[in-house]
Amino acid sequence: QVQLVESGGGSVQAGGSLTLSCKASGDTYGTYCMSWFRQAPGKEREGVASVNGDRTTIYADSVKGRFTISQDNDKNILYLRMNALNTEDSAMYYCAAARPWVRCRSLPALGDIGFWGQGIQVTVSS
């Protein structure tokens, strides 16, 4: 079992920045790919960014150049730095641990995820 707890969400004006954090605990050593997903009202949950154990990263086209995913392996914390936020970035953001055998060469599918955080709201106002 892996427990994931997000923090750092909130409200920000367009053009602003936020950093999300996700503290992982439990049986984390088997997880190779960690990701951030988001889900806006009335829309499907979508992958935003992923990082593999070899530190390779993948981003959705909509956030490339604005968002940065990183992790502190010593502290078991996953981060998502979000710059130049716009109203379309408003959503519930979820931290996700992929199943142990998953290597994220592209953004993972929902079925690749073994564990989810509870989600945290990000609201961007114009």
Image (cartoon, rainbow, N blue to C red):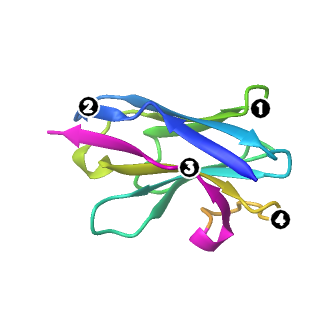
Q: Which residues are magenta?
A: 109-126
Cα distance, mark 4 to mark 2?
37 Å
Relative side of 96 to 14, left or right? right
For mark 3, what is the residue? 117
For mark 1, what is the residue? 73
In terms of sequence position, does the residue under pointer 1 or pointer 3 come before the other?
A: 1
In terms of sequence position, does the residue under pointer 1 or pointer 2 come before the other?
A: 2
Q: Secondary structure at mark 2?
A: strand
Q: Are marks 3 and 2 in contact (CB under 8 Å)?
A: no
For mark 4, what is the residue? 101
Q: In the image, what residue occupies the spot 82% across and 47% down?
A: 27
Cα distance, mark 4 to mark 1?
19 Å
Q: What amino acid is at disc 1?
A: Asn
Q: What amino acid is at disc 3?
A: Gly
Is residue 124 within the magenta segment? yes
For mark 2, what is the residue? 12
Cα distance, mark 1 to mark 2?
28 Å
Cα distance, mark 1 to mark 3?
18 Å
Residue 68, percent across and down? 53, 37
Between residues 82 and 37, which one lies in front from this camera angle? 37
Q: Residues within 10 Å of mark 4 (few under 14, many from 20)?
A: few
**Residue 87 drawn above or below residue 115:** above
Residue 74, percent across and down? 79, 26
Cα distance, mark 3 to mark 2?
22 Å
Q: What amino acid is at disc 4?
A: Trp
In terms of sequence position, does the residue under pointer 4 or pointer 1 come before the other?
A: 1
Cα distance, mark 4 to mark 3?
20 Å
Relative side of 86 to 118, left or right? left
Q: Residues within 10 Å of mark 3 (few under 14, many from 20)?
A: some
Is residue 59 within the magenta segment? no
In terms of sequence position, does the residue under pointer 3 or pointer 2 come before the other?
A: 2
Give the residue at the far bottom of this rendering.
Answer: 111
